[in-house]
Amino acid sequence: MDSETTPSRSSARFGSRIRPAWANHNFDLIFVARVAMSCGRALAGVVTPIYLALEGFSAFEISVYVVVVSLASAGMSTLIGASADRIGRKPFMVGLPLLTAGAAVVYAITALHPVLFLAGALGSFGRGAGAGAGAVGPYQPAESAFATDSVAAEHRNSMFGRLAFASSAGATAGGLLALLVTSSHVHGAAATVTFRASFVAIAVVSALAGIIAVGLEEPARTPRKAGQHHLHWPRRSSWLVYRLWITNSFNGAAIGMLGPFLTYWFFRRYGVGAAEVGVLYSVVNALTMASSLSASGLAKRYGLVRTSAVMRTAQALLIVPMVLAPNFELAGAVYLVRMVTQRISLPLRQSYTLGLAEPEERAAVAAISNLPSQLAMSSSPLLTGYLFDEVSLNLPFEVAALLQLVNAGLWWRLFKDHPPEEERSPGGDAGPSTVAHSAAETTKALTEPS
């Protein structure tokens, strides 16, 4: 009898890991939409840089494309985050995936460079981020705030870990869809035909994400008062925003130099095509799914800020052996280890930011706190493109490693004395997020020794 029930118990335990008891209707839809959107964005991250190279773009021209798309994405993300707290999060979670689907359709039917730039900017399309390309794009502040409002504080780390798991699952499928590209050694009109099926696939799964979000149940927002605008500064959470501006600037510069160019770097450095890179990203995403689910356990044992700082340090250091690897297989293996640390760090940092923000300011904090990161991410690719063409394929990534190392140190320095709500002892420090700061108090909170 025991032997017969063991498999079912194991299945039940695995099921509870994916869909725990606290999950509800909204979380289920957000989870599934994240899988679909991540699938499309991961596939776009694999095929777009190689497609642009085959259409005659130099490394510097690709970096200009990345800058244009990044600036557009930063603008949309900030506008969405600052508006979603007032007018609702659902409209953006429905509309933005459909915009991405439209961009993919444009890529499927034309290779005119100005049109590709415009479509990429409007759809936040094809910036790429290696095996981490399975995010959801500029509406993520609205999605994060919606998801945070849907669960209790004690489940927040676990919730973001599961959304990261959803991204990994979607990105795994997206990487495998790169096999739709039968050759990465054709040019011009032949490249458009060869890559068309992959762009159509991106359009389909992106549209599916928007359609799924239609079923979300969002409470009606309080009508705006006369003279009240959509855009607003998160006044009570401003101490948090200022500190995040400092740390995120270094991280954004590092991501801008590294993430958008990983696919292109593998293509140039080792001569591999979209299919090989896509399979690597799928393997990485599949093998790192469990690390997303383990994030909350590590944070509970060692502390969220400490765990995040250690993982970010490991991410930075692992870049160096990756770029020095003599072949694609070894570089891919080091990249896999690096992504394990990234999968642990990312949901914890998202959880921390949204947990310390005031509930009515969460979408604004999620967007505004990332603005310096997005601006840095939008400018640093130009340096990468120049260095790729004129100096070295490895140097930009080594600079990115240094920037991420600085980010890890600043994160620990600025936040080690501000644990999230679930880690505070009863009667202990209530944390800055529980009181309304005046301008003087905000300045003091930012500048006082941590």
Image: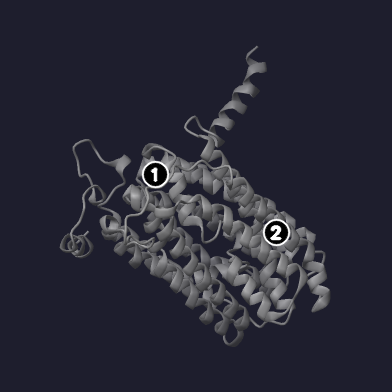
Among the 4 quarters of the image, the one containing residue 131: bottom right
The residue sitting at the front extreme is: 226
| Residue labelled with disc 1 | 299
Closer to the chain start, of discs 2 and 1, is 2
Residue 308's spot in the image, x, y percent?
40, 53
Local crowd size for mark 2, using a 10 Å CA cut-off: few (<14), some (14–19), many (≥20): many
Residue 3 drawn at (x, y percent): 66, 17
Colour mapping: one colour
**Residue 386 found in image quarter:** bottom right
Compared with residue 91, is residue 249 higher up or lower down, i.e. above or below? Answer: below
Of 433 and 322, nearer the camera is 433
Is 30 situated above or below 102?
above
Residue at disc 2, secondary structure: helix
Q: Residue at (49%, 54%) from the top-left corner?
A: 341
Give whichever of 177, 5 is nearer the camera.
177
Q: What residue type is labelled 2?
A: Ala
Q: Position of residue 18 (x, y in %)?
A: 56, 36
Q: Residue furthest bottom?
A: 390
Q: In which quarter of the image is residue 336?
A: bottom right
Q: Quadrant of the N terminus?
A: top right
Q: What element carries label 1?
A: helix
Q: Which amino acid does label 1 sit on?
A: Ala
Q: On the rendered structure, is 42 left or right of 245? A: right
Q: Is residue 117 visible in this depiction of the protein?
A: yes
Residue named by callout 2: 203
Who is closer to the viewer here, 445 or 207?
207
Query: Residue 219 appears at what percent x and percent y?
Result: 44, 42
Using the image, determine if residue 208 lies above or below residue 256.
above
Local packing at callout 1 (Cα closer than 10 Å; few below 14, some 14-19, many 20+) is many
The quarter in which the C terminus is drawn is bottom left
